[in-house]
Amino acid sequence: MLGPVDASKRPLTIPARFVPYMEKHRIYELFHELATELVMKKPLDHIMYLKQCLHHAARKRDVPRIILLAPPEFDKLKLAETLHAELSIRPVTRNDIREVHKSEIDEKCEEADDIALSMRKILRTGMIHDSGWVLVDVPRTRSEALALQRIGVIPTHVIEIIDSTLEYQDFSNAVNNMHPPLKSRYERFKTLEEREYKKNILGIRNAYSNLLIQMEVGGRSIEDLGRDCVILAKNKKNCGAPSVFRIALIGARGSGCHTVAKYLSQRYNIIHVDFNYIMEQSRLRQTLLGDKVRKYEHKWGRKPDSGIRNEIVEKRVLERDCLRKGWVLTGYPITVEDFILFDRLATPPNRVIFVDVDGCTLRERLVARRYNVVTGSEHNISSKNTAEIFVSGALGIHPRDYRSAIEEDICEYEENVNELKKYAGESAQVIDGNAEEKIVREKIEACLIKAAPSAPPRISQLPPEIKSSQIEFDPFDEPDPRVFDQIREPESTLSLI
Protein backbone atom coordinates (compact mmCIF):
# COMPACT_ATOMS: atom_id res chain seq x y z
CA MET A 1 0.00 0.00 0.00
CA LEU A 2 1.40 3.38 -1.01
CA GLY A 3 1.81 5.99 1.66
CA PRO A 4 1.60 9.77 1.24
CA VAL A 5 4.05 11.24 -1.22
CA ASP A 6 5.86 14.50 -0.55
CA ALA A 7 5.55 16.60 -3.69
CA SER A 8 8.80 18.44 -2.99
CA LYS A 9 10.76 15.17 -3.00
CA ARG A 10 8.86 13.28 -5.67
CA PRO A 11 6.78 15.45 -7.99
CA LEU A 12 3.94 13.51 -9.59
CA THR A 13 3.12 14.11 -13.24
CA ILE A 14 0.38 12.74 -15.47
CA PRO A 15 1.80 10.27 -18.02
CA ALA A 16 1.47 11.59 -21.55
CA ARG A 17 -0.47 8.54 -22.71
CA PHE A 18 -3.32 9.42 -20.33
CA VAL A 19 -3.75 13.01 -21.56
CA PRO A 20 -5.94 12.14 -24.61
CA TYR A 21 -8.36 10.24 -22.38
CA MET A 22 -8.58 13.19 -19.97
CA GLU A 23 -9.19 15.60 -22.86
CA LYS A 24 -11.87 13.41 -24.43
CA HIS A 25 -13.89 12.99 -21.23
CA ARG A 26 -12.97 16.44 -19.79
CA ILE A 27 -11.67 14.94 -16.55
CA TYR A 28 -9.63 18.01 -15.65
CA GLU A 29 -12.66 20.30 -16.11
CA LEU A 30 -14.75 17.93 -13.95
CA PHE A 31 -12.34 18.16 -11.02
CA HIS A 32 -12.02 21.91 -11.55
CA GLU A 33 -15.81 22.26 -11.22
CA LEU A 34 -15.90 19.98 -8.18
CA ALA A 35 -13.20 21.99 -6.42
CA THR A 36 -14.99 25.25 -7.28
CA GLU A 37 -18.32 24.01 -5.92
CA LEU A 38 -16.64 22.62 -2.81
CA VAL A 39 -14.95 25.92 -1.95
CA MET A 40 -18.10 27.95 -2.61
CA LYS A 41 -20.63 25.78 -0.78
CA LYS A 42 -18.35 24.64 2.09
CA PRO A 43 -20.51 21.65 3.07
CA LEU A 44 -20.15 19.99 6.46
CA ASP A 45 -19.79 16.53 4.95
CA HIS A 46 -17.59 17.13 1.93
CA ILE A 47 -17.37 13.44 1.02
CA MET A 48 -21.14 13.08 0.76
CA TYR A 49 -21.37 16.36 -1.12
CA LEU A 50 -18.82 15.22 -3.73
CA LYS A 51 -20.69 11.94 -4.15
CA GLN A 52 -23.88 13.85 -4.86
CA CYS A 53 -22.09 16.11 -7.32
CA LEU A 54 -20.67 13.14 -9.19
CA HIS A 55 -24.10 11.52 -9.26
CA HIS A 56 -25.58 14.54 -11.06
CA ALA A 57 -22.52 15.40 -13.14
CA ALA A 58 -23.58 13.30 -16.13
CA ARG A 59 -26.83 15.27 -16.44
CA LYS A 60 -25.64 18.76 -15.64
CA ARG A 61 -22.05 19.19 -16.81
CA ASP A 62 -22.79 19.79 -20.50
CA VAL A 63 -25.95 21.84 -19.94
CA PRO A 64 -25.52 25.38 -21.36
CA ARG A 65 -25.78 28.17 -18.80
CA ILE A 66 -25.58 31.55 -20.55
CA ILE A 67 -25.54 35.17 -19.41
CA LEU A 68 -26.50 37.77 -22.03
CA LEU A 69 -25.03 41.27 -21.78
CA ALA A 70 -26.27 43.95 -24.15
CA PRO A 71 -27.13 47.68 -24.20
CA PRO A 72 -30.59 48.67 -22.95
CA GLU A 73 -31.80 49.39 -26.51
CA PHE A 74 -31.00 45.86 -27.70
CA ASP A 75 -33.85 43.32 -27.60
CA LYS A 76 -32.19 40.76 -25.33
CA LEU A 77 -35.43 38.88 -24.65
CA LYS A 78 -35.95 38.12 -28.33
CA LEU A 79 -32.40 36.81 -28.59
CA ALA A 80 -33.01 34.66 -25.47
CA GLU A 81 -36.18 33.25 -27.06
CA THR A 82 -34.12 32.30 -30.12
CA LEU A 83 -31.69 30.42 -27.87
CA HIS A 84 -34.65 28.78 -26.13
CA ALA A 85 -35.97 27.50 -29.47
CA GLU A 86 -32.57 26.14 -30.54
CA LEU A 87 -31.14 24.82 -27.24
CA SER A 88 -34.30 24.30 -25.14
CA ILE A 89 -32.92 26.48 -22.35
CA ARG A 90 -35.25 28.64 -20.29
CA PRO A 91 -34.88 32.44 -20.26
CA VAL A 92 -34.76 33.95 -16.77
CA THR A 93 -35.49 37.68 -16.65
CA ARG A 94 -35.27 40.23 -13.89
CA ASN A 95 -39.07 40.14 -13.54
CA ASP A 96 -38.90 36.40 -12.81
CA ILE A 97 -36.43 37.07 -10.01
CA ARG A 98 -38.64 39.83 -8.59
CA GLU A 99 -41.66 37.52 -8.52
CA VAL A 100 -39.71 34.93 -6.54
CA HIS A 101 -38.42 37.60 -4.19
CA LYS A 102 -41.93 39.08 -3.86
CA SER A 103 -40.57 42.56 -3.27
CA GLU A 104 -42.32 45.77 -4.21
CA ILE A 105 -39.26 47.96 -3.77
CA ASP A 106 -37.84 50.00 -6.58
CA GLU A 107 -35.22 48.29 -8.74
CA LYS A 108 -32.61 50.87 -7.70
CA CYS A 109 -32.85 49.56 -4.13
CA GLU A 110 -32.53 45.88 -4.99
CA GLU A 111 -29.70 44.25 -3.11
CA ALA A 112 -27.24 42.00 -4.92
CA ASP A 113 -27.58 39.26 -2.29
CA ASP A 114 -31.39 39.27 -2.62
CA ILE A 115 -31.09 38.80 -6.37
CA ALA A 116 -28.63 35.94 -5.88
CA LEU A 117 -30.86 34.19 -3.33
CA SER A 118 -33.88 34.55 -5.59
CA MET A 119 -31.87 33.08 -8.47
CA ARG A 120 -30.92 30.11 -6.30
CA LYS A 121 -34.60 29.52 -5.48
CA ILE A 122 -35.41 29.50 -9.18
CA LEU A 123 -32.67 26.98 -9.88
CA ARG A 124 -33.84 24.68 -7.12
CA THR A 125 -37.41 24.53 -8.40
CA GLY A 126 -38.40 22.56 -11.47
CA MET A 127 -36.04 21.17 -14.10
CA ILE A 128 -34.39 24.45 -15.05
CA HIS A 129 -31.00 23.40 -13.67
CA ASP A 130 -31.08 20.20 -15.72
CA SER A 131 -32.24 21.80 -18.98
CA GLY A 132 -30.11 24.95 -18.77
CA TRP A 133 -30.86 28.67 -18.53
CA VAL A 134 -30.07 32.04 -20.04
CA LEU A 135 -30.05 35.14 -17.83
CA VAL A 136 -31.53 38.28 -19.40
CA ASP A 137 -30.70 41.66 -17.87
CA VAL A 138 -29.02 39.92 -14.92
CA PRO A 139 -26.50 40.82 -13.55
CA ARG A 140 -26.47 44.59 -13.96
CA THR A 141 -23.53 45.40 -11.69
CA ARG A 142 -20.29 43.80 -10.60
CA SER A 143 -21.64 43.25 -7.08
CA GLU A 144 -24.54 41.23 -8.50
CA ALA A 145 -22.14 39.13 -10.56
CA LEU A 146 -19.98 38.41 -7.52
CA ALA A 147 -23.07 37.57 -5.44
CA LEU A 148 -24.16 35.03 -8.05
CA GLN A 149 -20.70 33.52 -8.04
CA ARG A 150 -20.65 33.23 -4.25
CA ILE A 151 -23.78 31.07 -4.20
CA GLY A 152 -22.47 28.85 -7.02
CA VAL A 153 -24.36 30.25 -10.04
CA ILE A 154 -21.54 29.78 -12.54
CA PRO A 155 -22.31 30.20 -16.26
CA THR A 156 -20.66 28.25 -19.04
CA HIS A 157 -20.75 31.23 -21.44
CA VAL A 158 -21.02 34.99 -20.96
CA ILE A 159 -21.93 36.64 -24.28
CA GLU A 160 -21.73 40.42 -24.66
CA ILE A 161 -23.47 41.97 -27.65
CA ILE A 162 -21.66 45.05 -28.96
CA ASP A 163 -23.23 47.47 -31.43
CA SER A 164 -20.61 49.92 -32.67
CA THR A 165 -23.30 52.31 -33.93
CA LEU A 166 -24.42 52.83 -30.36
CA GLU A 167 -21.04 53.53 -28.85
CA TYR A 168 -21.08 56.51 -26.54
CA GLN A 169 -17.56 57.58 -27.34
CA ASP A 170 -18.19 57.90 -31.06
CA PHE A 171 -21.05 60.32 -30.57
CA SER A 172 -19.19 62.22 -27.90
CA ASN A 173 -16.30 62.76 -30.29
CA ALA A 174 -18.72 63.81 -32.99
CA VAL A 175 -20.23 66.47 -30.74
CA ASN A 176 -16.82 67.70 -29.66
CA ASN A 177 -15.86 68.05 -33.31
CA MET A 178 -18.94 70.22 -33.88
CA HIS A 179 -21.10 68.02 -36.08
CA PRO A 180 -24.65 69.38 -35.56
CA PRO A 181 -26.50 66.53 -37.38
CA LEU A 182 -25.23 64.03 -34.78
CA LYS A 183 -26.02 66.14 -31.75
CA SER A 184 -29.64 65.04 -31.50
CA ARG A 185 -28.57 61.40 -31.84
CA TYR A 186 -26.03 61.89 -29.08
CA GLU A 187 -28.68 63.41 -26.78
CA ARG A 188 -30.78 60.25 -27.23
CA PHE A 189 -28.05 58.17 -25.61
CA LYS A 190 -27.82 60.34 -22.52
CA THR A 191 -30.55 58.32 -20.83
CA LEU A 192 -30.12 57.00 -17.30
CA GLU A 193 -30.14 53.34 -18.38
CA GLU A 194 -27.45 53.94 -20.97
CA ARG A 195 -25.22 55.76 -18.53
CA GLU A 196 -25.68 53.04 -15.89
CA TYR A 197 -24.84 50.34 -18.43
CA LYS A 198 -21.69 52.12 -19.57
CA LYS A 199 -20.63 52.62 -15.96
CA ASN A 200 -21.15 49.01 -14.84
CA ILE A 201 -20.21 46.96 -17.90
CA LEU A 202 -16.47 47.12 -17.20
CA GLY A 203 -16.92 45.61 -13.73
CA ILE A 204 -19.06 42.79 -15.13
CA ARG A 205 -16.42 42.08 -17.77
CA ASN A 206 -13.77 41.78 -15.07
CA ALA A 207 -15.97 39.44 -13.02
CA TYR A 208 -16.44 37.08 -15.99
CA SER A 209 -13.14 37.70 -17.79
CA ASN A 210 -12.38 33.99 -18.21
CA LEU A 211 -15.79 33.25 -19.78
CA LEU A 212 -16.53 36.45 -21.71
CA ILE A 213 -17.24 36.29 -25.45
CA GLN A 214 -17.85 39.56 -27.30
CA MET A 215 -19.97 39.56 -30.46
CA GLU A 216 -20.27 42.49 -32.86
CA VAL A 217 -23.74 42.99 -34.36
CA GLY A 218 -22.35 44.13 -37.70
CA GLY A 219 -25.77 44.61 -39.32
CA ARG A 220 -26.94 41.06 -38.55
CA SER A 221 -30.48 40.29 -37.47
CA ILE A 222 -31.32 38.83 -34.07
CA GLU A 223 -32.00 35.45 -35.69
CA ASP A 224 -28.52 35.43 -37.22
CA LEU A 225 -27.00 36.43 -33.88
CA GLY A 226 -28.97 33.66 -32.23
CA ARG A 227 -27.56 31.05 -34.59
CA ASP A 228 -24.03 32.29 -33.91
CA CYS A 229 -24.68 32.17 -30.16
CA VAL A 230 -25.91 28.58 -30.50
CA ILE A 231 -22.62 27.63 -32.17
CA LEU A 232 -20.68 29.30 -29.35
CA ALA A 233 -22.79 27.59 -26.70
CA LYS A 234 -22.00 24.17 -28.12
CA ASN A 235 -18.26 24.82 -27.81
CA LYS A 236 -17.04 24.32 -24.26
CA LYS A 237 -14.46 26.83 -23.11
CA ASN A 238 -11.17 25.60 -21.72
CA CYS A 239 -10.88 26.40 -18.02
CA GLY A 240 -7.11 26.08 -17.94
CA ALA A 241 -6.74 22.36 -18.42
CA PRO A 242 -3.35 21.22 -19.72
CA SER A 243 -3.65 20.59 -23.42
CA VAL A 244 -1.25 19.11 -25.96
CA PHE A 245 -1.81 19.97 -29.60
CA ARG A 246 -2.26 16.95 -31.86
CA ILE A 247 -3.04 18.48 -35.24
CA ALA A 248 -3.95 16.72 -38.46
CA LEU A 249 -3.37 19.30 -41.22
CA ILE A 250 -4.99 17.88 -44.35
CA GLY A 251 -4.50 19.40 -47.78
CA ALA A 252 -3.28 18.61 -51.28
CA ARG A 253 0.28 19.17 -52.38
CA GLY A 254 0.76 22.87 -53.03
CA SER A 255 -1.85 23.92 -50.46
CA GLY A 256 0.84 25.24 -48.12
CA CYS A 257 0.25 22.70 -45.33
CA HIS A 258 3.94 21.83 -45.11
CA THR A 259 4.96 25.50 -44.79
CA VAL A 260 2.29 26.23 -42.19
CA ALA A 261 3.26 23.11 -40.23
CA LYS A 262 6.86 24.34 -40.02
CA TYR A 263 5.60 27.67 -38.72
CA LEU A 264 3.37 25.99 -36.10
CA SER A 265 6.27 23.80 -35.03
CA GLN A 266 8.40 26.85 -34.23
CA ARG A 267 5.54 28.95 -32.89
CA TYR A 268 4.13 26.41 -30.40
CA ASN A 269 7.17 24.17 -29.90
CA ILE A 270 5.49 21.07 -31.29
CA ILE A 271 6.89 18.34 -33.51
CA HIS A 272 6.27 18.49 -37.26
CA VAL A 273 5.62 14.97 -38.53
CA ASP A 274 5.70 14.78 -42.32
CA PHE A 275 4.30 11.48 -43.54
CA ASN A 276 6.36 11.37 -46.74
CA TYR A 277 9.56 11.88 -44.74
CA ILE A 278 8.88 9.21 -42.11
CA MET A 279 7.72 6.88 -44.88
CA GLU A 280 11.05 7.24 -46.66
CA GLN A 281 12.95 6.81 -43.40
CA SER A 282 11.06 3.60 -42.64
CA ARG A 283 11.80 2.27 -46.11
CA LEU A 284 15.56 2.83 -45.68
CA ARG A 285 15.90 1.41 -42.18
CA GLN A 286 16.83 -2.21 -41.57
CA THR A 287 13.91 -2.95 -39.28
CA LEU A 288 10.90 -5.25 -39.37
CA LEU A 289 8.71 -2.35 -40.42
CA GLY A 290 11.19 -1.36 -43.14
CA ASP A 291 11.26 -4.95 -44.45
CA LYS A 292 7.48 -4.97 -44.53
CA VAL A 293 7.39 -1.75 -46.57
CA ARG A 294 10.00 -2.93 -49.06
CA LYS A 295 8.37 -6.34 -49.51
CA TYR A 296 4.97 -4.79 -50.12
CA GLU A 297 6.28 -2.34 -52.72
CA HIS A 298 8.31 -5.05 -54.43
CA LYS A 299 5.40 -7.49 -54.53
CA TRP A 300 2.57 -5.14 -55.52
CA GLY A 301 4.48 -2.28 -57.13
CA ARG A 302 2.55 0.49 -55.34
CA LYS A 303 2.39 2.38 -52.05
CA PRO A 304 1.82 0.37 -48.86
CA ASP A 305 -1.76 -0.18 -47.74
CA SER A 306 -3.57 1.59 -44.90
CA GLY A 307 -2.41 -0.85 -42.23
CA ILE A 308 1.29 -0.33 -42.95
CA ARG A 309 0.86 3.44 -43.30
CA ASN A 310 -0.91 3.63 -39.97
CA GLU A 311 1.79 1.53 -38.34
CA ILE A 312 4.44 3.97 -39.56
CA VAL A 313 2.52 6.98 -38.22
CA GLU A 314 1.73 5.24 -34.93
CA LYS A 315 5.38 4.45 -34.30
CA ARG A 316 6.33 8.12 -34.76
CA VAL A 317 3.53 9.87 -32.84
CA LEU A 318 3.93 7.53 -29.85
CA GLU A 319 7.58 8.48 -29.38
CA ARG A 320 8.51 10.46 -26.30
CA ASP A 321 8.97 13.88 -27.93
CA CYS A 322 5.57 13.75 -29.66
CA LEU A 323 3.80 12.61 -26.50
CA ARG A 324 5.40 15.35 -24.43
CA LYS A 325 5.27 18.32 -26.83
CA GLY A 326 2.48 17.44 -29.26
CA TRP A 327 2.63 17.22 -33.03
CA VAL A 328 1.29 18.53 -36.33
CA LEU A 329 0.93 15.88 -39.05
CA THR A 330 0.99 16.59 -42.79
CA GLY A 331 0.44 14.24 -45.73
CA TYR A 332 -1.75 11.86 -43.73
CA PRO A 333 -4.47 10.53 -43.60
CA ILE A 334 -4.87 9.88 -47.31
CA THR A 335 -8.04 7.77 -47.34
CA VAL A 336 -10.96 7.21 -44.97
CA GLU A 337 -9.45 3.86 -43.99
CA ASP A 338 -6.34 5.72 -42.87
CA PHE A 339 -8.47 8.11 -40.82
CA ILE A 340 -10.40 5.31 -39.10
CA LEU A 341 -7.21 3.48 -38.12
CA PHE A 342 -5.66 6.79 -37.05
CA ASP A 343 -8.57 7.51 -34.70
CA ARG A 344 -8.03 4.17 -32.97
CA LEU A 345 -4.59 5.16 -31.74
CA ALA A 346 -3.96 5.94 -28.09
CA THR A 347 -3.32 9.59 -29.07
CA PRO A 348 -5.75 10.53 -31.88
CA PRO A 349 -5.75 14.08 -33.29
CA ASN A 350 -7.68 16.67 -31.28
CA ARG A 351 -7.58 19.23 -34.12
CA VAL A 352 -8.51 18.33 -37.72
CA ILE A 353 -8.03 21.18 -40.19
CA PHE A 354 -8.62 21.01 -43.95
CA VAL A 355 -6.86 23.56 -46.18
CA ASP A 356 -8.86 23.94 -49.39
CA VAL A 357 -7.17 25.25 -52.54
CA ASP A 358 -8.62 25.04 -56.05
CA GLY A 359 -6.93 22.78 -58.58
CA CYS A 360 -5.66 25.55 -60.87
CA THR A 361 -3.85 27.28 -58.03
CA LEU A 362 -2.32 23.98 -56.89
CA ARG A 363 -0.93 23.25 -60.36
CA GLU A 364 0.46 26.78 -60.76
CA ARG A 365 2.28 26.59 -57.42
CA LEU A 366 3.76 23.14 -58.05
CA VAL A 367 4.80 23.73 -61.67
CA ALA A 368 6.60 26.97 -60.74
CA ARG A 369 8.40 25.42 -57.78
CA ARG A 370 12.15 24.87 -58.00
CA TYR A 371 14.85 23.78 -55.53
CA ASN A 372 18.40 25.04 -55.23
CA VAL A 373 20.59 22.01 -55.90
CA VAL A 374 23.36 23.48 -53.72
CA THR A 375 21.54 24.72 -50.63
CA GLY A 376 18.25 22.83 -50.95
CA SER A 377 16.19 26.02 -50.56
CA GLU A 378 12.77 26.30 -52.24
CA HIS A 379 12.03 29.01 -54.84
CA ASN A 380 9.29 30.09 -57.19
CA ILE A 381 10.44 30.89 -60.72
CA SER A 382 7.56 33.31 -61.26
CA SER A 383 9.06 35.73 -58.71
CA LYS A 384 11.74 38.22 -59.71
CA ASN A 385 14.06 37.28 -56.86
CA THR A 386 14.89 33.91 -58.39
CA ALA A 387 15.53 35.12 -61.95
CA GLU A 388 19.30 35.35 -61.57
CA ILE A 389 19.57 32.00 -59.80
CA PHE A 390 17.46 30.36 -62.49
CA VAL A 391 19.65 31.74 -65.24
CA SER A 392 22.80 30.48 -63.53
CA GLY A 393 21.40 26.94 -63.55
CA ALA A 394 21.40 26.44 -59.77
CA LEU A 395 17.69 25.58 -59.66
CA GLY A 396 16.29 22.16 -60.50
CA ILE A 397 12.95 20.35 -60.55
CA HIS A 398 12.20 17.84 -57.83
CA PRO A 399 11.15 14.42 -59.21
CA ARG A 400 7.83 14.72 -57.40
CA ASP A 401 7.15 18.04 -59.18
CA TYR A 402 6.98 16.58 -62.69
CA ARG A 403 3.59 17.13 -64.29
CA SER A 404 2.68 13.44 -64.26
CA ALA A 405 3.43 13.12 -60.52
CA ILE A 406 1.55 16.37 -59.79
CA GLU A 407 -1.56 15.19 -61.62
CA GLU A 408 -1.43 11.82 -59.87
CA ASP A 409 -1.19 13.37 -56.40
CA ILE A 410 -3.92 15.96 -57.01
CA CYS A 411 -6.30 13.38 -58.46
CA GLU A 412 -5.71 11.07 -55.50
CA TYR A 413 -6.50 13.88 -53.05
CA GLU A 414 -9.63 15.01 -54.91
CA GLU A 415 -10.94 11.44 -54.95
CA ASN A 416 -10.69 11.11 -51.17
CA VAL A 417 -11.18 14.62 -49.75
CA ASN A 418 -14.99 14.56 -49.77
CA GLU A 419 -15.09 11.23 -47.95
CA LEU A 420 -12.53 12.49 -45.44
CA LYS A 421 -14.63 15.60 -44.69
CA LYS A 422 -17.77 13.53 -44.40
CA TYR A 423 -16.10 11.19 -41.92
CA ALA A 424 -14.59 14.04 -39.89
CA GLY A 425 -17.95 15.83 -39.73
CA GLU A 426 -18.32 18.65 -37.22
CA SER A 427 -15.01 17.82 -35.54
CA ALA A 428 -13.07 19.29 -38.49
CA GLN A 429 -12.60 22.89 -39.58
CA VAL A 430 -12.12 24.01 -43.17
CA ILE A 431 -9.76 26.90 -44.07
CA ASP A 432 -9.56 28.68 -47.42
CA GLY A 433 -5.97 28.24 -48.57
CA ASN A 434 -6.22 30.50 -51.63
CA ALA A 435 -5.44 33.58 -49.52
CA GLU A 436 -2.00 34.90 -48.62
CA GLU A 437 0.25 32.78 -46.44
CA LYS A 438 -0.03 35.18 -43.49
CA ILE A 439 -3.84 35.09 -43.56
CA VAL A 440 -3.89 31.29 -43.76
CA ARG A 441 -1.55 31.09 -40.76
CA GLU A 442 -3.75 33.43 -38.74
CA LYS A 443 -6.89 31.42 -39.53
CA ILE A 444 -5.24 28.16 -38.52
CA GLU A 445 -3.90 29.73 -35.32
CA ALA A 446 -7.43 30.91 -34.51
CA CYS A 447 -8.62 27.30 -34.83
CA LEU A 448 -5.92 26.17 -32.40
CA ILE A 449 -6.45 28.85 -29.77
CA LYS A 450 -10.14 28.26 -29.30
CA ALA A 451 -11.38 25.02 -27.82
CA ALA A 452 -11.70 21.91 -29.95
CA PRO A 453 -15.07 21.65 -31.69
CA SER A 454 -17.73 19.99 -29.57
CA ALA A 455 -18.88 17.17 -31.83
CA PRO A 456 -19.84 13.53 -31.53
CA PRO A 457 -16.91 11.10 -31.69
CA ARG A 458 -15.81 10.14 -35.16
CA ILE A 459 -15.79 6.47 -34.14
CA SER A 460 -18.97 5.41 -32.36
CA GLN A 461 -17.98 3.24 -29.43
CA LEU A 462 -20.20 0.25 -28.66
CA PRO A 463 -21.21 -0.18 -25.01
CA PRO A 464 -18.75 -2.50 -23.24
CA GLU A 465 -19.85 -6.05 -22.72
CA ILE A 466 -20.33 -6.74 -19.02
CA LYS A 467 -19.42 -10.23 -17.90
CA SER A 468 -21.07 -11.90 -14.97
CA SER A 469 -17.73 -12.19 -13.17
CA GLN A 470 -17.36 -8.39 -13.24
CA ILE A 471 -20.67 -7.66 -11.49
CA GLU A 472 -20.27 -6.70 -7.85
CA PHE A 473 -22.74 -8.32 -5.47
CA ASP A 474 -24.21 -6.40 -2.57
CA PRO A 475 -25.99 -8.61 0.01
CA PHE A 476 -28.43 -5.78 0.73
CA ASP A 477 -29.64 -5.56 -2.88
CA GLU A 478 -33.03 -7.02 -3.70
CA PRO A 479 -32.81 -10.21 -5.78
CA ASP A 480 -33.66 -10.04 -9.43
CA PRO A 481 -36.85 -12.12 -9.97
CA ARG A 482 -35.49 -13.36 -13.31
CA VAL A 483 -33.05 -15.65 -11.47
CA PHE A 484 -35.98 -17.90 -10.51
CA ASP A 485 -37.12 -18.44 -14.08
CA GLN A 486 -34.79 -21.42 -14.51
CA ILE A 487 -35.75 -22.93 -11.14
CA ARG A 488 -39.53 -22.87 -10.92
CA GLU A 489 -42.06 -23.92 -13.47
CA PRO A 490 -43.60 -21.13 -15.54
CA GLU A 491 -47.00 -19.98 -14.35
CA SER A 492 -49.96 -21.02 -16.45
CA THR A 493 -51.63 -18.27 -18.45
CA LEU A 494 -55.41 -18.11 -18.76
CA SER A 495 -57.02 -16.48 -21.76
CA LEU A 496 -59.64 -13.88 -20.98
CA ILE A 497 -61.48 -14.47 -24.26
Image (cartoon, rainbow, N blue to C red):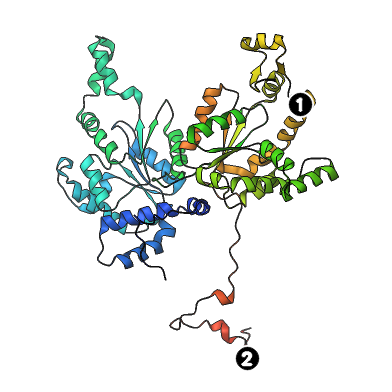
Q: Is residue 35 visible?
A: yes
User: What is the three-letter code of the residue carrying label 1?
Assistant: Pro
Left or right? Give the position of 259 relative to 62: right
Examine the rendered structure and indicate whether residue 136 appears above or below residue 266: below
Q: Of the residues under marks 1 and 2, which one precedes in the sequence?
A: 1
Q: Observer-nearest residue: 180 or 352?
A: 352
Please name which of the two marks, 1 or 2, marks the residue nearer to the observer: 1
Q: Are marks 1 and 2 in contact (CB under 8 Å)?
A: no
Q: Position of residue 393 (x, y in %)?
A: 72, 12
Left or right? Give the position of 406 relative to 455: right
* Helix, strand or loop status at disc 1: helix
Examine the rendered structure and indicate whether residue 361 appears above or below residue 107: above
> On the rendered image, what quadrant is the N terminus found in?
bottom left
* Helix, strand or loop status at disc 2: loop
Left or right? Give the position of 10 relative to 493: left
User: What is the three-letter code of the residue carrying label 2?
Assistant: Glu
Look at 47% across and 40% down and name the residue there.
231
Residue identified by numbered label 1:
399
Crowdedness near tag 2: few (<14), some (14–19) or many (≥20) residues, C-alpha within 10 Å: few
Q: Observer-nearest residue: 484 or 430?
A: 430
Q: Is residue 453 visible?
A: no
